[in-house]
Image: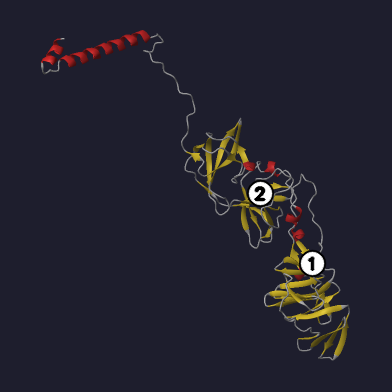
Amino acid sequence: MCAAGGITASADASYAAYPEAADFTKKAVFTALSDFTADGENYAFADGRTINVLSEGNLTVYEADKTVARLEYGGSALYYADETGAVYDLKNAAASFTMPEIKTDFKTGEYSRYDLLGDVIKYTDLQNDTVTALEGNFSALKQYGDTLYAIKGNEVCKISGTDVLPFSAELEYFYDCAAEHGVNIGGTAEKLKDYSLKFVTLQAGAYRTEIDLKALDGEKFVLKGATEKLDKNVSALLLCYTGNAAIVSVGDSAYITLNDPSFLNETEIDCYTEAEFKTATVTGNRIYASPYVIIGTSALFPATGAVVKVLHKLEPKGVLGSVFYEVEYTDGEQTKKGYVSDGFLTEYIFDDKEPTEHPDPMHSDKNDIKTVLLILLIVILVLAAAAYLLFIGVPRRGKRNKDKDKQ
């Protein structure tokens, strides 16, 4: 297989270049095409020891242990035969499937007949009783539905009357060139902080690639998933424009896509609601430049304790990851606008001033140790006297006790 066309992205590392839409499509080109087969919208092509399966615009390649001479679907499974006629499955295990007999003559409609004689196809018009030899070296004449196909050189063709037409649309497949070649980061990190709230609509047919915006210290974006082609319109939060691309987010996922009016348009989304308070204190440690929370969109740090003016409350509407508050804050001598996630604001305004001291007019720095010791001595003597009076006041019995009492 080889590419049709090339990637039109810039090689300049300082420029974030996303592939053009046409770059995501390739056409299968073969060098030793020996057979092909079809099953509904699934097509398989034998090219030397390679089996190429095209299904719904995607290509899957299988490597055979031997040169593939024939291909055939049996049920939903695909089998191949080598030049000796031995049959295998796609795991190169011997299979019990029997290849059907090779057919060389077909009739389409009421008056058209085709015969493969060696490498020549003869077309017979049964109504006018005329025979025409079709130009080219043909092989593997096959019929699927009402359409007749044949291999001509290393291409598959459609046969209609005496016309030999290219079988091109079915040979096109999706090629993830963003994953293959990567996408330059360029100046994206700086552009993420230069922000104003905008939403966009990605049109059906647009390509987008999920990226990790927490990793912007390299030359190329870290991809978190394969590129996908949208089959319907999708609303997204615009994070920034960079190079020929746009960085957008849907929920907690971020994507890079081509900034092309055919596929991306700024749009209005009514997501504003009235906030519960007009001023608030930030209880988190950051205010962000956009309602997409990563270190790369951090605009003020540390922010804990900052008193802010609350402008709006932003509800998710299927685009944002959570509820956010749009706030106005002071950074040095500048007044800026930023975003705080729900749960990191409080209506309570903290008073961070030092308390005012009110001295006690009765307070004295004079040393009172002697006075304290004298008071303590008096207390001890009083307690000793009370104990003695209690002792002698208790009656005693017997002479011995009386003598002790006298004593």
Helix, strand or loop under label 2? loop
Q: In this view, does 365 lie above or below 292?
A: above
Asked if marks 2 and 1 touch (Cβ < 8 Å), the reply is no
Amino acid type, residue under disc 2 in the picture: Asp
Describe residue 200's horizontal placement relative to residue 181 as left or right: left
Residue 253 screen position, x and y as percent: 62, 52
239 or 33: nearer the eye? Answer: 33
Residue found at x 85% / y 78%: 138
Is residue 147 in view? no
Identity of the amino acid at label 1?
Answer: Ala
Question: Where does residue 227 sit, x and y in percent of width and height?
Answer: 69, 57
The quadrant of the picture occupied by the N terminus is bottom right
Determine the secondary structure under disc 1: loop
Distance Cα–Cα, label 2 vs label 1: 32 Å
Res 28 label: 1
Residue most toward the left?
A: 398
Q: Any mark on residue 196, and which?
A: none
Q: Which residue is more in the foreground, 7 or 78?
A: 78
Left or right: where 74 falls relative to 251: right
In the displayed structure, would residue 275 be above or below residue 109? above
Q: In this view, does 89 lie to the left or right of 377?
A: right
Q: In which quarter of the image is the C terminus?
A: top left
Residue 212's disc number: 2
Residue 51 at x, y percent in the picture: 77, 70
| The quarter of the displayed image where residue 89 is located | bottom right
Residue 382 falls in which quadrant of the image?
Answer: top left
Q: Residue furthest front?
A: 400
Can I make out residue 344 in this image? Answer: yes
Residue at 49% x, 26% y is: 353
